[in-house]
Image (spheres, rainbow, N blue to C red):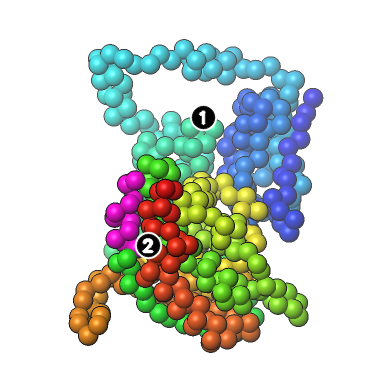
Amino acid sequence: MAIEIIVPAPGESVSEVTIASWLRKEGEWVEMDEPIAEFESDKATFEVNAEKAGVIDKLIGNEGDTIPVGTVVAVINEKAKKPASAKKEEVKAEKTPTVKEDKPAAKTATKAEKAPAQEDINASPVAAGLLAEYGIKASLVKGSGSNGKITKMDALEAIVKLGGVKSGGFGSGGREETREKMSNLRKTISRRLVAVKNETAMLTTFNEVDMKPIMDLRSKYKKDFAEKHGVGLGFMSFFTRACCISLMEWRAVNASIVGEEIAYHDYCDISIAVSAPKGLVVPVIRSAESLSLDGIEAEVKRLALKARDNKLSIDEMTGGTFTITNGGVFGSMMSTPIINAPQSAILGMHNIVQRPVAINGEVHIRPMMYLALSYDHRIIDGRESVGFLVRVKQLLENPEWMVDGKKPEETLLGM
């Protein structure tokens, strides 16, 4: 009996997807729930799995094709007999002993050092092409696909990590150009950014914050914090907490326009901009105002890991009320971030630089960070925008104000 595998809708508003990569080939045996292909939409990347075990009779479409949701992309023959080669691979995997002696381990290492031929590498055509284009040996890349297959995402991550350079690149004297089709995700980002610039009255206000108090707290408690909660103590939890307190005081900054009405939110769903392999994504920390610092850090870590692995769901990337973006991790000194519609404001963090500042009439060298708040002037006036940013600055420079009258160690370590 033939089983048809169709592309599910990754979201209510998604009508088409792009075939990012085939993870299996026609004629191969596939187990139930094993991934067959990777797809990307304008909101997320996802895999389609085999609904039954069997032999893949047909794969429909090529990598890079854009197809409607609900399209049949694969046909599996569940009545086909399992090939002997597949059975042997299973038995071999089950009987592989753990190396305990020094000599066998040394032999294994010697074999690993000998790079296999390019044609023997288990990689998708797109991944193989990218690695060849940037001069990276496939043997240096660990595949995350089925049976260790190198996917397009693995190749892109390796290019960034290993610093691959395109053949005939800078300094080669050539004048060639390469064109690639924009992904659905990039097209959607482009449309939304242009729409925000055209449809909002966006302004940006700036301030600066002395990061020494928070840096001192982190230095003192980060080791105990990690042992107590199992997560690191970063800057994002302090910024998220400060923003939540400020949003409760300046409600317009946490609002959005719905038709001819302004929707004020009594909760803070904080969107955190994360740079993922396929572009910028903005997962949401739900009800962040109710979370402790360790709870915020745990959510940041969970969402960042899912973003890195392209595993974020549609629900995890929609519905935020306010956004925080940290250009400082890339070395940005100052920027004017664009509002994440339909939200009305976004806070931009930047790099921390040792600068001379005047304190009580004396010059001190302090770790300073510029803050930028871009906001929609249709909802937020200068009083609200400046007041909000000043409040965030006050809270960050006096972190004890964010812990409800408790001592820092009581909040950070749950004492």
Residue matched to label 1: 147
Give the class, few, some or many, for how many residues have Cα within 10 Å of label 1's Cα (few <14, many ≥20): few
- In the rendering, at what x and y percent does residue 285 appear? 56, 56
In terms of secondary structure, where does tag 1 sit? helix
In terms of secondary structure, where does tag 2 sit? helix
Q: CA distance from mark 1 to mark 2?
A: 35 Å
- In the rendering, at what x and y percent does residue 162 appear? 33, 48
In this rendered view, identify the residue nearer to me: 92 or 255: 255
From which residue to which does the magenta span run?
214-224
132 sits left or right of 287 in the view: left
Residue at horizontal 62 percent and vertical 42 percent from the top: 47
Residue at horizontal 38 percent and vertical 16 percent from the top: 98
Q: How many marks?
A: 2
In this rendered view, identify the residue nearer to me: 26 or 343: 343
In the picture, the disc for residue 401 is: none
Check the image and report above or below for 109 versus 313: above
Circle 2: residue type: Val
- In the rendering, at what x and y percent does residue 157 appear? 43, 48
- In the rendering, at what x and y percent does residue 25 appear? 60, 33
In the picture, the disc for residue 329 is: 2
Q: Quadrant of residue 137?
A: top left
Give the class, few, some or many, for how many residues have Cα within 10 Å of label 2's Cα (few <14, many ≥20): few
Q: Where is the N terminus found, in terms of image quarters?
A: top right
Residue at horizontal 67 percent and vertical 73 percent from the top: 264
In this rendered view, identify the residue nearer to me: 12 or 271: 271
Q: Is residue 386 magenta?
A: no
